[in-house]
Image (cartoon, rainbow, N blue to C red):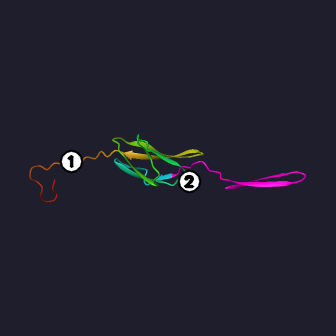
Protein backbone atom coordinates (compact mmCIF):
# COMPACT_ATOMS: atom_id res chain seq x y z
CA UNK A 1 0.00 0.00 0.00
CA UNK A 2 1.31 3.42 -0.97
CA UNK A 3 0.15 6.93 -0.18
CA UNK A 4 0.25 9.35 -3.11
CA UNK A 5 0.24 13.05 -2.26
CA UNK A 6 -0.45 15.88 -4.69
CA UNK A 7 0.43 19.43 -3.65
CA UNK A 8 -0.74 22.36 -5.76
CA UNK A 9 0.22 25.89 -4.84
CA UNK A 10 -0.10 29.37 -6.19
CA UNK A 11 0.47 32.93 -5.00
CA UNK A 12 -2.54 32.91 -2.66
CA UNK A 13 -3.11 29.30 -1.54
CA UNK A 14 -1.71 25.76 -1.27
CA UNK A 15 -3.88 22.70 -1.59
CA UNK A 16 -2.75 19.19 -0.62
CA UNK A 17 -4.63 15.95 -1.21
CA UNK A 18 -3.61 12.34 -0.59
CA UNK A 19 -4.89 8.99 -1.78
CA UNK A 20 -3.95 5.47 -0.74
CA UNK A 21 -3.09 3.13 -3.61
CA UNK A 22 -2.79 -0.63 -3.31
CA UNK A 23 -0.40 -2.23 -5.80
CA UNK A 24 -0.93 -5.93 -6.52
CA UNK A 25 1.78 -8.24 -7.70
CA UNK A 26 1.60 -10.78 -10.48
CA UNK A 27 0.83 -14.34 -9.39
CA UNK A 28 3.83 -16.53 -8.49
CA UNK A 29 3.45 -20.31 -8.80
CA UNK A 30 5.36 -22.42 -6.29
CA UNK A 31 4.68 -26.09 -5.55
CA UNK A 32 6.49 -29.22 -4.45
CA UNK A 33 5.64 -32.86 -5.09
CA UNK A 34 6.19 -35.39 -2.30
CA UNK A 35 8.01 -37.60 -4.84
CA UNK A 36 9.38 -37.14 -8.35
CA UNK A 37 9.89 -40.76 -9.42
CA UNK A 38 8.55 -44.22 -8.77
CA UNK A 39 6.68 -47.17 -10.18
CA UNK A 40 3.24 -47.20 -11.77
CA UNK A 41 0.71 -46.71 -10.31
CA UNK A 42 2.46 -43.74 -8.66
CA UNK A 43 0.49 -41.58 -6.22
CA UNK A 44 1.93 -38.07 -5.91
CA UNK A 45 0.82 -35.33 -3.51
CA UNK A 46 1.49 -31.77 -4.62
CA UNK A 47 1.75 -28.94 -2.05
CA UNK A 48 0.78 -25.50 -3.34
CA UNK A 49 2.89 -22.78 -1.68
CA UNK A 50 2.25 -20.05 -4.26
CA UNK A 51 2.52 -16.45 -3.14
CA UNK A 52 0.36 -13.43 -3.87
CA UNK A 53 -3.34 -12.71 -3.88
CA UNK A 54 -4.16 -15.44 -6.36
CA UNK A 55 -7.64 -16.14 -7.65
CA UNK A 56 -7.18 -19.41 -9.51
CA UNK A 57 -4.99 -22.49 -9.34
CA UNK A 58 -5.02 -24.86 -12.29
CA UNK A 59 -3.12 -28.14 -12.16
CA UNK A 60 -1.95 -29.80 -15.39
CA UNK A 61 -0.57 -33.24 -14.56
CA UNK A 62 1.08 -33.95 -17.91
CA UNK A 63 -0.92 -37.09 -18.65
CA UNK A 64 -4.02 -35.40 -20.06
CA UNK A 65 -5.66 -34.76 -16.68
CA UNK A 66 -6.24 -31.31 -15.19
CA UNK A 67 -7.76 -29.96 -11.99
CA UNK A 68 -8.86 -26.52 -10.76
CA UNK A 69 -8.56 -26.44 -6.97
CA UNK A 70 -7.99 -23.96 -4.13
CA UNK A 71 -6.84 -26.81 -1.85
CA UNK A 72 -3.25 -26.46 -0.59
CA UNK A 73 -2.60 -30.17 -1.27
CA UNK A 74 -3.83 -32.15 -4.27
CA UNK A 75 -3.04 -35.74 -5.22
CA UNK A 76 -2.78 -37.47 -8.57
CA UNK A 77 -2.15 -41.07 -9.66
CA UNK A 78 0.13 -41.71 -12.63
CA UNK A 79 -0.40 -44.93 -14.60
CA UNK A 80 1.89 -46.09 -17.38
CA UNK A 81 3.05 -49.29 -19.05
CA UNK A 82 6.33 -47.75 -20.26
CA UNK A 83 9.04 -45.59 -18.73
CA UNK A 84 7.69 -42.04 -19.07
CA UNK A 85 8.31 -38.52 -17.80
CA UNK A 86 5.24 -36.42 -17.04
CA UNK A 87 5.58 -32.66 -16.58
CA UNK A 88 3.27 -31.56 -13.76
CA UNK A 89 2.39 -27.86 -13.85
CA UNK A 90 0.69 -25.40 -11.55
CA UNK A 91 -0.73 -22.36 -13.33
CA UNK A 92 -1.51 -19.57 -10.87
CA UNK A 93 -3.55 -16.56 -11.99
CA UNK A 94 -4.78 -13.27 -10.57
CA UNK A 95 -5.83 -9.82 -11.89
CA UNK A 96 -2.22 -8.97 -12.79
CA UNK A 97 -1.36 -12.05 -14.83
CA UNK A 98 -0.39 -15.66 -14.48
CA UNK A 99 2.68 -17.75 -13.70
CA UNK A 100 3.54 -21.41 -14.30
CA UNK A 101 5.81 -23.75 -12.33
CA UNK A 102 6.77 -27.21 -13.63
CA UNK A 103 8.17 -30.42 -12.09
CA UNK A 104 9.15 -33.57 -14.03
CA UNK A 105 7.65 -36.76 -12.63
CA UNK A 106 9.40 -39.96 -13.84
CA UNK A 107 7.20 -43.07 -13.73
CA UNK A 108 8.46 -46.58 -14.44
CA UNK A 109 6.20 -49.44 -15.46
CA UNK A 110 5.44 -52.11 -12.92
CA UNK A 111 5.97 -55.11 -15.15
CA UNK A 112 6.86 -57.70 -12.51
CA UNK A 113 4.57 -60.72 -12.73
CA UNK A 114 5.03 -63.39 -10.07
CA UNK A 115 4.48 -66.89 -11.35
CA UNK A 116 5.85 -70.24 -10.24
CA UNK A 117 4.83 -73.88 -10.40
CA UNK A 118 5.28 -76.77 -8.01
CA UNK A 119 5.85 -80.17 -9.54
CA UNK A 120 3.07 -82.35 -8.19
CA UNK A 121 3.05 -82.57 -4.41
CA UNK A 122 6.75 -81.77 -3.85
CA UNK A 123 6.21 -78.91 -1.43
CA UNK A 124 8.47 -80.37 1.26
CA UNK A 125 11.96 -81.82 1.13
CA UNK A 126 15.46 -81.89 2.52
CA UNK A 127 18.05 -79.18 1.92
CA UNK A 128 19.00 -78.43 -0.74
CA UNK A 129 15.47 -78.69 -2.04
CA UNK A 130 15.52 -78.04 -5.77
Q: Residue visible at 23% across and 48% down?
A: 114
Label 1: few (<14), some or many (≥20) within 10 Å? Answer: few
Residue that numbered label 2 is attached to: 51
Residue that numbered label 1 is attached to: 115
- Image coordinates of residue 100 in percent, x first then y, are 53, 45
Q: Secondary structure at mark 2?
A: loop
- In the image, taking residue 110 as reference, residue 130 lies left or right, namely left
Which one is in front, 66 or 124?
66
Q: Residue visible at 54% across and 50% down?
A: 54
Which quadrant is the N terminus positioned in? bottom right
- Between tags 2 and 1, which lies in front? 2
Q: In the orientation shown, which residue stands out farthest toward the bottom?
A: 126
Residue 125 tag number: none
Q: In the orientation shown, which residue stands out farthest toward the left?
A: 121
Figure check: 22 above or below 109: below
Which one is in front, 32 or 49?
49
- Image coordinates of residue 93 in percent, x first then y, are 54, 46
- Image coordinates of residue 10 in percent, x first then y, are 88, 51
Q: Which residues are magenta?
A: 1-30
- In the image, taking residue 56 as reference, residue 106 lies left or right, namely left
Which one is in front, 109 or 18?
18
Q: Is residue 18 magenta?
A: yes
Mark 2 vs mark 1: which is more N-terminal?
2
Q: Secondary structure at mark 1?
A: loop
> Pointers 2 and 1 in contact (CB under 8 A)?
no
- In the image, taking residue 61 as reference, residue 3 lies left or right, namely right
- Image coordinates of residue 58 in percent, x first then y, are 48, 46
Q: Is residue 50 magenta?
A: no
Measure the C-alpha gap from mark 2 to mark 1.
51 Å
- In the image, taking residue 96 as reference, residue 111 lies left or right, namely left
Amino acid sequence: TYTITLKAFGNCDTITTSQTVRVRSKAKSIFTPNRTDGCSPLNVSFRNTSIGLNKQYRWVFGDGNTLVSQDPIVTHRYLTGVLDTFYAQLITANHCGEDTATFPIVVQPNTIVLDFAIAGTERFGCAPHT
